Image (tube, coloured by chain):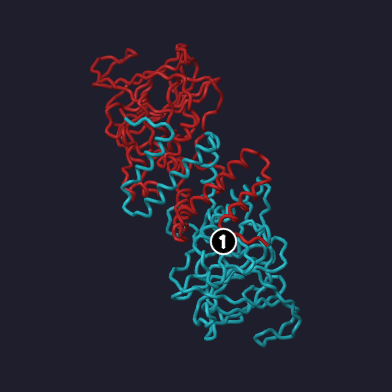
Chain colours: A red, B cyan
């Protein structure tokens, strides 16, 4: 019968995955075992700490719903999401920088006409966003669906609110680029906001004396056939949390200067009734393959 | 503004936990970040693989209920539970060997009189279990509560069955040692059984071509004031899965020879109507502190 001391045990567990048919899955699992076991040995993890971890992971899973993904949030605040992003985007070749998907993507958005005000009349300073999608040589890419989403003036995404089920999306839409690669829309200026602190991940952030804030930004997800899906944010220049984003998502090239405007008309020729902001940002896509991410909440088909 | 390449990112995440008030929590979190990041870098984890992991962990959390703990099962099949056991029990000094708690402990059991048949008349070969609890010098320990639980003849624990809510426990009880440190009870001979394969962990075991079986055993959890809680199994000698337990829990000293008996009376003087088995095993407890584990299902007070 096997009698394991702690290193023999590790070897036995690694060996148990030897018949895994898929070589990549086998590699990932065997490395996972090595990594987990090294962690336990290095930290001399106590039984109580192990219990805490089991309970923390369980609560994290149970906090997930079709519109909330607490495990992505955990990955985000531990810098894992940005690291996965980094190791998969080592060579940008002039393409727009990428950043985290975040936990508030809820799947393909509803397409809206250019110029739509997506803010659902929520309070906030008005903003006009104009953008263009091109390849690496500046050639416009037409017909590209671009999903956009951002937090409202009170710091919440639509999907975090009880009203989401009945009133539907706000500050969330899809635009499809025109023949010149352009798309534009109206919304409100997003503000910096805390990640949700009513779950295990937010609890950990507060208990470890980290602040839970993300600098203001708008999410963009562009998905063009023949190009790598582009998952990124545009950050609002001047935000006080740009250098301490709780999910480590800021890159200099993704910070946009927002112009304050008082013109009576907006760039699409329609009237402006109040002072407004103008965000201008171009996206440059890299040739490649890939499918856009699916939302990662609990699937409706799960029996949970 | 910070611009992270992949190694600078890791340093920034480690630094973000610098103000953690509890030094042990700080150490555990910073080592966790190092370990997770090393794993992502070493494996060049793809976005799709990260998505798979997020979804797997979410499904694992969602599979947990007050009487099912899928994360403990994950820890068990990855050998993590046995490793935590190993690093916390390096010096046994003659104390009984420990092994995994497993996912089917449901908290303090109902105390029953010595000799009780705990099998609730389920089919199976009859077994009489006689045991004694002592300190390391063989001095009997009186008044020690010992929780026992085991799978039935069909390979399931009571808590896995729909009938559990209405009919209550079977093959699960608590006995309190008498003045001589003894306790004894009647039950059925447990058999080897598969871990649950209807959840993400069982799926992984089948997809990686591991078998899901555990060799037959009875769980014991003894908790005496002034002694380390003793969490262990006694395995049935001769089981075909003793050398390939899916959770790596077997230790030679925990394997008991079960005697086949045809005596007309059992050790407590009461009649035996069929041939029966006799399990005899003594537990030796090590002085120390510690509280017995709580059941780790989803707490009833959770909002999930």
Q: Is residue B214 above or below residue B144?
A: above
Residue at 42 percent across and 53 percent down: it is B303
Q: In the image shown, does A162 or A277 lie closer to the viewer? A: A277
Identify the residue at image location x=42%, y=25%: A97
In percent of width and height, residue A289 lies at: 56, 24
- Quadrant for the N terminus of chain A in the image: bottom right
The reply to whether residue B161 is in sight is no
Q: What residue appears at the point 48 percent right and 28 percent down from the top-left corner?
A: A89
Q: Which quadrant of the structure image shows residue A130?
A: top left
Q: Label 1: how many residues lie within 10 Å, few (<14), some (14-19) or many (20+)?
A: some
Q: Which residue is mark 1?
A: B102
**Mark 1 belongs to chain:** B
Which x, y percent locates residue A278?
30, 20
At x 58%, y 65%, the residue is B164
* Residue A295 position (above or below residue B191): above
Which residue appears farthest toward the bottom when viewing the image? B269
Name the foreground residue: B19 vs B279.
Answer: B19
Q: How many marks?
A: 1
Place of residue B85 in the rendered image (x, y in percent of width and height, measured from the top left): 53, 61
Q: Where is A228 relative to A200, above or below?
A: above
Taking depth in this image into account, of A205 and B301 the one nearest to the observer is: A205
Task: Give the x, y percent position of residue B4.
Answer: 39, 32
SS label for mark 1: loop
Determine which quarter of the picture holds residue A271.
top left
Whether residue A224 is visible to the viewer of this picture, yes or no, is yes
Question: For this view, does B22 lie left or right of residue B299?
Answer: left
């Amino acid at each position: 019968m096997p009698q394991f001391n702690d290193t023999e045990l590790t070897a036995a567990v690694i060996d148990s995955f030897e018949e895994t048919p898929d070589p990549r899955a086998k590699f990932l699992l065997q490395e996972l075992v090595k990594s987990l076991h090294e962690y336990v040995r290095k930290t001399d993890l106590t039984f109580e700490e192990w219990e805490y971890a089991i309970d923390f992971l369980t609560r994290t899973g149970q906090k997930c719903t079709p519109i909330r993904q607490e495990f992505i949030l955990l990955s985000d605040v531990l810098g894992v999401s940005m690291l996965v992003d980094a190791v998969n985007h080592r060579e940008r070749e002039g393409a727009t920088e990428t950043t985290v998907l975040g936990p508030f993507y809820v799947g393909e958005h509803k397409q809206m006409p250019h110029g739509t005000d997506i803010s659902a009349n929520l309070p906030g300073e008005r903003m006009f966003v104009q953008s263009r999608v091109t390849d690496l040589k500046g050639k416009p890419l037409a017909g590209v669906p671009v999903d956009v989403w951002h937090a409202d003036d009170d710091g919440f995404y639509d999907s975090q609110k009880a009203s989401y089920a009945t009133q539907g999306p706000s500050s969330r839409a899809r635009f499809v680029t025109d023949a010149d690669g352009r798309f534009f829309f109206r919304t409100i200026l997003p503000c910096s906001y805390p990640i949700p602190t009513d779950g295990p991940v937010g609890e950990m952030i507060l208990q470890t004396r980290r602040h839970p804030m993300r600098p203001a930004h708008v999410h963009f997800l562009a998905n063009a056939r023949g190009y790598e899906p582009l998952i990124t944010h545009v950050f609002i220049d001047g935000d006080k949390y740009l250098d301490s984003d709780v999910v480590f998502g800021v890159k200099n090239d993704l910070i946009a200067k927002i112009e304050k405007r008082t013109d009576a008309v907006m760039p699409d020729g329609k009237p402006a009734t109040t002072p407004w902001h103008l965000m201008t940002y171009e996206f440059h896509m890299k040739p490649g393959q890939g499918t856009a991410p699916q939302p990662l909440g609990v699937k409706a088909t799960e029996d949970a």
